[in-house]
Amino acid sequence: MDTRRLTMAQAVIRFLKNQYVERDGAEQPFFAGCFGIFGHGNVAGLGQALQENLDFRYYQSRNEQAMVHTAAAFAKMKNRLQTFACTSSIGPGATNMITGAAVATINRLPVLLLPGDLFARRNVAPVLQQLESEHSQDVSVNDCFRPVSRYWDRLNRPDQLVTALPEAMRVLTSPADTGAVTLALPQDVQTEAFDYPEALFQKRVWRIPRNRPDRAALIEAAGWIRQCRRPLIVAGGGVHYSDANDVLDQFSRQTGIPVCETQAGKASLRFDHPLNLGAIGVTGTFAANRVAKDADLIIGIGTRFSDFTTASKTAFQDPDVRFININVAEFDAYKHSALPLVGDAQATLEELLEWLEGWHVDMAYRAYCKQLRDEWDQEVERLYALRHTPLPCQSELIGAVNELGDPDGVMICAAGSLPGDLHKLWRARHPKHYHLEYGYSTMGYEIAGGLGIKMADPDREVYVLVGDGSYLMLSADVVTSIQEGYKLTIVLMDNQGFKSIGGLSRSLGQEGFGTRYVYPQDGALPGDDAAAAQPLPVDLATNAESLGARVFRCQTYDDVAAALEAAKAIDHTTVLYVQTDRYEDVPGYESWWDVPVAEVSEMPAVAAARAAWEAMRGTERYFLETEKPDVPAH
C-alpha cells in the first residue's frame, strides 16, 4: 500500500482539499478554505500545515465565535453544499466557538471545527489554559462541544485520523443529520508524523441524494389531500436546501393550496405570489394565522415546527386537524403525529403532484386566501409609509431597505425585534433575498454572517440589519470584511438598548426593567419608561469608523434613503447609522407566544399578565391522535 509520511495536521488539510460534493450532476469542492485564530494549541500544527498548503485558503478572523457564524452563513447561502473549516487554540479560543457550534447544529448547517486540545502524552500537564479534573485525565474544555455537535471526536493518535475524517464527512454531507462536526486535536499529536495511506488523499465525491418517501405513505397522503377542505402548506428551510422553490410554486398553483412561511422558509415563494400568505406564527401575518387557525390539513415541508411557527401549539385550532410532514429527517417528519413522507422536498413534491393530477381546492377557499393576501399587502404598504417623528420607526426603515436596496441583494438579520418585523414585512423577490438565523437567534451573528454571505456570492449586495445590542456584542469582523475586500452595507438601528426584550418585559408587567442602556439611578437600573433616565454617551457611528467602515449618520427616513443610494457606489463596508423609536412597534397579528409569567408578585401589572397568560395557556394543544374521522370529499 502506498503511503505518505505527514504530520496529523498536514494530513487534515490535504484530506480537506480533496473532498467534493455532487448533486443533480453539479460537482464542487466541499471546503472553501479555513478560518482561524492561532494560539499555542494550533499554531505549530494546523498553522504550519495551512502555511504549507497555500492553495487551501486561510482567512484570519477577529473572534472565534464570529468565524463559525461566517462559515454557517456561507453554508446556508450555498444550500449546505459547501462550507469552511474553523480552527482555534485550546482554551478560550475553543470555548468561544461553542456558541457558533450551537448555531450550526440547531440550524442544521455543516461546519467543521478543529479546536486544539491538551497534550495527549500528559507528562507536561497542567498546561496553560488547561481545565483540570480530579475525576479524569481525559477531559478538557472541548468536551463542552459534545451536546452542540452532530459528531464529536478527540484524536489522541495520528492514525485515528484515517477513520475519523470519513465519518466527519459523512455527517457534514448528510441532508438529515448535518450540523457542527468537532474534531478535537491535541496540540502534540497535531505535530506528530504518520505514514498515511495515499488513498486517504485521493479525490472523493460525496453524492447528495434525493431520497424518495415510501410509496404507500405517498398514496395515503394524496388521499388525505383529496379529502380535505382547508389545506395549508407550511414551507420551512428544507424548501431552500432542496432547491424546491420552483416545484413548490407549481404545486401551489396546480392544487390551489395556500403557502405560509417559517423564518427559515421565507422566500420559498416570491412575496407577490397569489397564494403566498406570508409569515406564520408568533411573527406571522393575519392572513397566514387566520388560515392556519381553521386549516383541517397542514402540509409541513422541511420545517421542524418550532414554537414560533406553531405559536406555542396554539396556531392550529381545528379539532380534527391532520398533518403531513415532508422532511429528509425522520425525527421531524413524525412530529405532531403526522403522516410522515421521509424524503427530499423537491423529489417528494414532484411525485405527490402526479397523484394529485386533476385535483384542486374549492375555488371559494382559494379566493378567500387571495383576499387575505391582498389585505395583508395593504397593511405592509401602510407600515412602510409611516413617517414617524421625532425618530423614525423600524417598519419604515425595513421598507426603505426593501424598496430602495438592490432587489438582487441579500438581507441578513438574527436577533432582537428586527426578525419579527422582517418576517412579517420583508417582500422577498428571490430565494436568497431573506437570510435569518432564527433557530438560535444569536446576537452578534449579523455582521459575521453577512461576511459569509458575501463570500458565498460576491456579486450580490449584502444588507446587514442590526440593532445596537447585537452590534455591541460582535462587530469586530467589520475589520475582516475590509481586510478581505468584501463590502457589506450595514444598517445600524440604535434604540439605546434591547428593544425586543423591553417590549416583552412590558407585556409581562415588568416595565422593561434592565433593557435600556442608561445610567443607574439611586444605585439601581431604572425601568424602561423612566423619564429621567440618562442615556450612556456611546457613539456607535464613530466606533464603526474606527474599524474602517464608511459611515453615514442618518436622522430621518429621507437620510436613510439617500444613504442607501450613495452606498451603492462605495466599494467597501458602509454603515448607515440611525437612531430609532424603541416604543413604536409593528403589531402582533392574532398569535401568541408562551412566555410564563411569575405566578405570585406584589406588582399588579404582573398579576394581570399572569391571568392573561393562564387564559391563553389553555388553548395550547397536543397532537397525539392517530385516528382521524374521514372528511367527506367535495
Image (cartoon, rainbow, N blue to C red):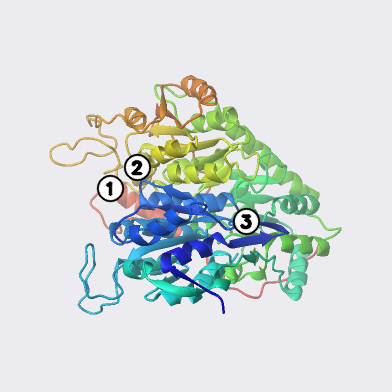
Quarter-of-image position of residue 182: bottom left
Q: Is residue 538 left or right of residue 16?
A: left
Residue at image position (75%, 48%) is 366
Q: Is residue 304 left or right of residue 121?
A: right
Q: Which residue is mark 1?
A: 604
Q: CA distance from mark 3 to mark 1?
A: 48 Å
Q: Nearer the viewer, mark 3 or mark 1?
A: 3
Q: Which residue is mark 3?
A: 241
Precedes in sequence: disc 3 or disc 2 = 3
Q: Of the numbered discs in the image, which one, if any, rests on residue 502?
A: 2
Which element type, helix, strand or loop, lies under badge 3? Answer: helix
Q: Nearer the viewer, residue 11 or 567?
A: 11
Query: For the residue marked with disc 3, what is the amino acid?
Result: Tyr
Q: Nearer the viewer, residue 244 or 178?
A: 178
Q: How many marks?
A: 3
Which element type, helix, strand or loop, lies under badge 1? Answer: helix
Measuring from the top left, give residue 603's x and y in whole percent: 25, 48
